[in-house]
Image (cartoon, rainbow, N blue to C red):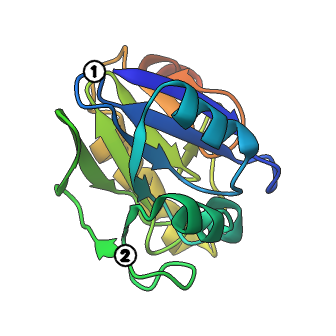
Amino acid sequence: MIFTHFLTASNESNAFLVACETTRKALLVDAGAFEPAIAEFVDEHGLTLETVFITHGHYDHTDGLDGLVARYRPRIVARQTPCAGHTADVVGHGDTVSVGNLKGTVLATPGHTPDMVCLHFDGMVFTGDALFAGSVGGTSGATAEQQQLDAIRKHIFTLPLETEIHTGHGPSSTVSIEKQFNPFFVE
């Protein structure tokens, strides 16, 4: 697996690229901005940016779609369509998203937004704004917050402890660290 991280200028959001070493097909998780570094990495490594997976519809995760679509014409995968004005393939909990020979599983984690989804590949999960290192994404109220915390416990914290957590903002973490030390879950 080829894997890299980009920090975008849109509210300092993270974007992550996952690619199959065999087929050279790539998937970008979130598109806060279409940074030159993304195109440079794709070109330097001879990749085909085939898919953009959107964790949720906030601008700092979608504003780069126009540039990505204009340059690569990727398939957009999201919880709802349209997504930032683009037609998207709609996915739900348990669906598979493939990139070359790699297969990821969609995990529903509503709360920060109703359309919040994560993407799990073996050894790593992309949590958007559902779960951060030491925090969780903001919600509209107590009901949404409880829904989000329950979804994280059920779908993220049941992954192997060494699973890397790659977040929508800030540093990455692991399931083990967040289960033990994230103040929203420590009892």
The residue that appears at 52% across and 18% down in the rendered structure is 177
Question: Does residue 154 appear left or right of residue 48 in this picture?
Answer: left
Instruction: Pick the quarter of the image with the N terminus.
Output: top left
Position in image of residue 28 (x %, y %): 48, 46
Question: On screen, 87 above or below 10?
Answer: below
Query: Contact (CB < 8 A) between labels 1 and 2?
Result: no
Q: Which of 63 and 136 is in front in this view?
A: 63
Q: What element carries label 2?
A: loop
Q: Name which quarter of the figure residue 88 lies in.
A: bottom left
Q: Residues within 10 Å of mark 1 (few under 14, many from 20)?
A: some
Q: Is mark 1 on a helix, strand or loop?
A: loop
Q: How crowded is mark 2: few (under 14 residues within 10 Å), some or many (20 or more)?
A: some
The residue that appears at 65% across and 34% down in the rendered structure is 40
Tell me, yes or no, if residue 42 can be seen here.
yes
Q: What residue type is labelled 1?
A: Pro
The residue that appears at 42% across and 35% down in the rendered structure is 47
Question: Does residue 45 appear left or right of residue 162 in this picture?
Answer: right
Instruction: Tell which residue pokes out farthest to the top in this image.
Output: 162
Q: Nearer the viewer, residue 117 or 131?
A: 117
Q: Which of 161 and 11 is in front in this view?
A: 11
Question: On screen, 71 above or below 124?
Answer: below
Position in image of residue 157 (x %, y %): 35, 33
* Residue at the disc numbered 2: 88
Q: Which mark is residue 160?
A: 1
Question: On screen, 163 above or below 125?
Answer: above
Between marks 1 and 2 in the image, the one whose residue lies nearer the viewer: 2
Q: Which amino acid does label 2 sit on?
A: Ala
Question: On screen, 67 above or below 156?
Answer: below
Tell me, yes or no, if residue 185 can be seen here.
no
Q: Looking at the image, is mark 1 or mark 2 earlier in the sequence?
A: 2
The residue that appears at 46% across and 52% down in the rendered structure is 149
Q: Name which quarter of the figure residue 63 lies in.
A: bottom right
